[in-house]
Amino acid sequence: MLNLNIDKINDTVPLEVIEESEFISRFIGRCAPEEVFERQGDKHEDYDIALSESIDSYLEQVFARGSGSEVWVQSEQCNGDGISAISFTAAADFKENHLLGLLALLNGKFELFSILCRFYEDFEDGADIGSIGIFKGQVLISEGIIKQMPNQKIHLNKNCRLI
């Protein structure tokens, strides 16, 4: 069972998945440069810009896996206080392990931010598979994402809700 409690997400990623999947290893192991995160207390414009560019670059690297996938990434800033949301679309093959890796990431380095990840089967047609994310301490997951994981029993608890 995949328990989507925000405090337990990392515990739900099987060790063998992390060890065997290059995709997930890149998700967990490669992040925005440490020096960017060390400057979280700074409120000047350089910090916002550096963090935004760093996250955009990281997500683009993760999803541009040489498979011909195209990636769209957008970071949004709110009132100059840093990143308020990160949304990106990946016209790529959706695999169950990718979602597990993404959940681990959401509970990792980027936990300071509200993140919404929207997956598109065909970006140009606008037909999206679904979205998952974190907002105000809750995991958000759409039915479309759940349908992509037929082998997982999804348990929605107080920290997780359908969108």
Image (cartoon, rainbow, N blue to C red):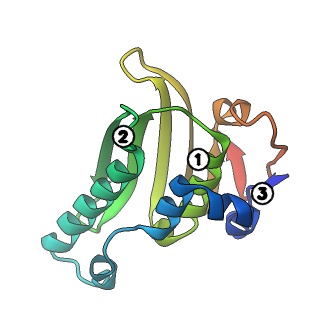
Q: What element carries label 3?
A: loop
Quadrant in the rendering for residue 154: top right
Residue 75 in view = yes
Q: Which of marks 3 and 1 is nearer the N terminus?
A: 1
Is disc 3 surrounded by few (<14), some (14 to 19) or many (20+) residues within 10 Å? few
The answer to which of marks 1 and 2 sits earlier in the sequence is 2
Task: Name the image quarter holding residue 43.
Answer: bottom left
Which residue is found at the position 53% from the left and 56% from the top?
Answer: 22
Viewer-proximal residue among 63 and 120: 63
Label 2: which secondary element: loop
Q: Is residue 89 left or right of residue 23?
A: left
- Give coordinates of residue 16: x percent, y percent: 72, 62
Question: For the residues marked 1 and 2, what is the alpha-carbon distance in whole angstroms?
Answer: 16 Å
**From the viewer's perspective, is 93 left or right of 56?**
right
* Crowding at mark 2 (Cα within 10 Å: few <14, some 14-19, many 20+): few
Number of numbered discs visible in the structure rendering:
3
Task: Choose the circle earlier in sequence order: 2 or 3.
Answer: 2
Q: Can residue 13 be seen in this view?
A: no
Q: Which amino acid does label 2 sit on?
A: Gly
Residue 158, disc: 3
Task: Indicate the amino acid at tag 3.
Answer: Lys
Q: Nearer the viewer, mark 3 or mark 1?
A: 1
Q: Report the Cα–Cα distance between label 2 and label 3.
A: 39 Å
Residue that numbered label 1 is attached to: 98
Q: In this view, does 70 lie above or below 41?
A: above
